[in-house]
């Protein structure tokens, strides 16, 4: 097994710290110390902290979307209903390190304009658009009427579940999400 490159060690360390402790609370010096790279090495790969956040969010998007697509597909194979998305989210919520959505957290920390770097807000918007497109794809595959509207409404439920679980930490969030997504599914069944 090969040793991860300096860039990968930096990104792995930043990912863990940004997700666990937040973007503002995680300083560059801490990332350098915990990744075991020299300061010059970090700046050779990432010219600023925002560049590092951008790279982390890009990687997080790819990883999370691949996981969510797989988790939903596995469940759809057994039960063809939008409510399987709640169960997929429940799997994520049950992980030991769950700290919510990296993109929601970034916007919350940086503000609606994502601080002084509009690329970060653009990245959050693109992540959510990708998720909404995936839900529309599911709605089409389930032959639901108004798949775009289904996706828009399901997004409100999914985003609400994520934020609610961060504060409530209870299984009731998944149950409520399953009921709401099930009702949305039933409301869009073809006549």
Image (cartoon, grey):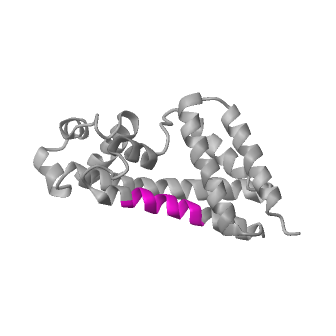
Q: Is residue 9 magenta?
A: no
In the visual, does 59 lie left or right of 84?
A: left
Which residue: 64% across, 29% down?
A: 170
In the visual, does 168 lie left or right of 9?
A: right
Decide if residue 20 is in sight here.
yes
User: In the image shown, does 25 or 69 lie closer to the viewer?
Assistant: 25
Which residue: 50% across, 53% down?
A: 64
Look at the image and give the residue range highlighted in magenta.
Answer: 122-133
Which residue: 67% across, 64% down?
A: 149
Residue 92 image point, x, y percent: 58, 42
Residue 107 image point, x, y percent: 39, 47
Q: Residue furthest left?
A: 40
Question: In which quadrant of the rendered view does residue 176 lie?
Answer: top right
Q: Residue furthest front?
A: 112
Residue 102 image point, x, y percent: 43, 46
In the visual, does 52 lie left or right of 187?
A: left
Task: Examine the rendered structure and indicate whether residue 28 appears above or below residue 43.
Answer: above
Residue 80 image point, x, y percent: 79, 59
Question: In which quadrant of the rendered view does residue 168 lie?
Answer: top right
Which residue: 73% across, 38% down?
A: 175
Characterize the magenta stretch by its predominant secondary structure: helix
User: In the image shown, does 191 or 51 lie closer to the viewer?
Assistant: 191
Decide if residue 2 is in sight here.
no
Q: Is residue 130 magenta?
A: yes
User: Could you tell me which quadrant the C terminus lies in?
Assistant: bottom right
């Amino acid at each position: 097994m090969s040793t991860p490159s300096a860039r990968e060690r930096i990104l792995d360390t930043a990912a863990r710290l940004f997700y666990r402790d937040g973007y503002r609370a995680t300083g560059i010096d801490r990332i350098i110390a915990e990744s075991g790279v020299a300061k010059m090495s970090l700046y050779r790969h990432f010219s600023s902290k925002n560049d590092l956040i951008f790279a982390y969010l890009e990687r997080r998007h790819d990883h999370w979307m691949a996981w969510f697509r797989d988790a939903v597909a596995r469940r759809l194979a057994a039960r063809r209903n939008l409510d399987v998305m709640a169960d997929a989210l429940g799997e994520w919520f049950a992980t030991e390190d769950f700290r919510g959505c990296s993109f929601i957290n970034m916007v919350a920390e940086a503000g609606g304009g994502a601080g002084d770097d509009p690329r970060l807000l653009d990245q959050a918007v693109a992540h959510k658009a990708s998720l909404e497109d995936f839900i529309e794809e599911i709605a089409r595959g389930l032959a639901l009427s108004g798949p775009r509207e289904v996706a828009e409404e399901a997004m409100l439920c999914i985003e609400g579940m994520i934020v609610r679980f961060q504060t409530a930490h209870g299984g009731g969030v998944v149950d409520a999400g399953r009921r709401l997504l099930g009702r949305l599914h039933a409301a869009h069944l073809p006549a």
